[in-house]
Amino acid sequence: MHTVVVGTSGVTASDVLAVARGGARIELSAEAVAALAAAREIVDALAAKPDPVYGVSTGFGALATRHISPELRAQLQRNIVRSHAAGMGPRVEREVVRALMFLRLKTVCSGHTGVRPEVAQTMADVLNAGITPVVHEYGSLGCSGDLAPLSHCALTLMGEGEAEGPDGRVRPAGELLAEHGIRPVELREKEGLALLNGTDGMLGMLIMALADLDTLYKSADVTAALTLEALLGSDKVLAPELHAIRPHPGQGASAANMLAVLKGSGLTGHHQDDAPRVQDAYSVRCAPQVAGAGRDTMAHARLVADRELASAVDNPVVLPDGRVESNGNFHGAPVAYVLDFLAIAAADLGSIAERRTDRLLDKNRSHGLPPFLADDAGVDSGLMIAQYTQAALVSELKRLAVPASADSIPSSAMQEDHVSMGWSAARKLRTAVDNLTRVIAIELYAATRAIELREGLTPAPATQAVIDAVRAAGVEGPGPDRFLAPDLAAADAFVRGGELLAAVEKVTGPLQ
């Protein structure tokens, strides 16, 4: 099994994916253990002094003015976890919780939080045991960290609350820890606060969304190429010299991908109309410009994610010179903005894909294809309602594109009077990515059927490879009306599982 070693300088996106989705084991480096111990010495020294230090010997948030006596500090740390574990709603997905915990461990190991080495080791042990705290949908405002989600994770470390075991059953966390020989932690000064104060949930979801969108943008290039082919469109607009004079990198990559898929096609450039076409519709001709802009948005989002992965997000933080200082680094604005930006780009990619699908189904615009790609139009409805489903998904994508980060709602008696709503931005982006996959799957379904209806014309080798693979995956081709939902579900699985890209890349080589 793959092992991820956590040091003091952060982790990579591939590390997060390996732990969250791949179940990779975690080890703490010797460097991290030493940094944890050194920072803890500083916290212990401050705790022994009479002067109040935020998070060490005071209350939290709007209650930070109260000095807490030494005999009450352990209770204070337990109480902050219990009281902040106030999430509600459906359970959050296992991969999100694993990413959340792993990223909090990453910051803890930076040596800037003052958490003891044994607490960090317990976090790693819980992840390695396959124990997943029950975390709920609602409870984070994306400022002062993802407070409620992280609190539910910290509660599990204390042996309280509920968690899911490796067998998928939800049980009391204390029972699960005992079964795996993990001793619950007894939190000391600052530790409860340090386990809750981070952008880890929104960052984890950003990293997973970027991984999924990387596949989806390449898949959208493929389906756009197939639709261009099915509509007997021109591939001349994909020429590298045209995209070189508007040098957005994403646009050039998208055009190159489409051109690679269409290489050797016998359908492009044909015209079945009485009057020759001068140019194709925007949804076909401008596909690289729209998908390319989304790719460039992803590039910016990756830059933000990489910076956040290298960050130590906590309040207060332990500095190398021994100071423990309050700060605002827990504010989720940088992550929230790109989460919202990605949702906007996803909505537009879905929108242009739906317009191409609609064009395939309209006999007045499809250049010789039967209405709705039906076998016997009128008796058969063909893909009429598949496009309805796609339109409903696109409409939802547009609603999900409304930015969460444009909102702020004050909390904690106006101490926390501006928040990022980054967790909410991440949650809606996950839904957007899910829906975008379905939108692309429907375009794939329509385009492959349309190409097969172009009798006497030979598709590109890459296109034929897609048709062969999708039919082998249980997605049926043209014919009389049938129960359509299973076909659409199979097409969705074909895109979601990466089989579409795999089929194409066996012919084209790796797409950009």
Image (tube, rainbow, N blue to C red):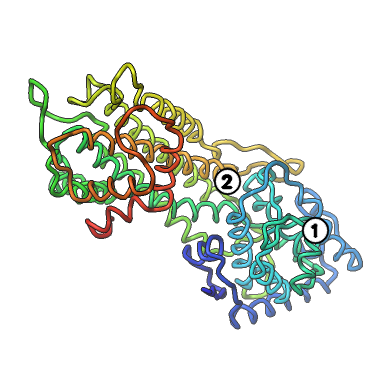
- Identify the residue under disc 2: 422
Question: Which residue does the numbered mark 1 point to in the structure image?
Answer: 172
- Pick the front one: 97 or 50: 97
Question: Where, by quadrant of the figure, is residue 104 drawn?
Answer: bottom right
Q: Identify the element where label 1 is drawn.
A: strand
Please identify the quadrant where the C terminus is shown. bottom left
Residue 138 occupies quadrant: top right
Query: What is the total number of numbered labels drawn onto the structure image?
Result: 2
Q: Residue furthest left?
A: 275
Q: Quadrant of residue 43?
A: bottom right
- Residue 213 rendering spot, x and y as whole percentages: 41, 49
The kind of residue on which mark 2 rests is: Gly
Indicate whether 156 appears above or below 209.
below
CA–CA distance in space, label 1 to label 2? 30 Å
Q: Amino acid at mark 1?
A: Pro
Where is residue 315 drawn, in percent x and y? 67, 60
SS assignment at label 2: helix
Looking at marks 1 and 2 on the same chain, the residue that comes earlier in the sequence is marked by 1
The residue sitting at 51% across, 35% down in the picture is: 400
Q: Position of residue 437 (x, y in %)?
A: 43, 42
Dot 1: within a 10 Å radius of its alpha carbon, few (fewer than 14), some, or many (20 or more) residues? some
Instruction: Give the side of residue 296 with respect to residue 324, left or right.
Output: left
Q: Which residue is pictured at 73% across the width and 55% down the height? A: 170
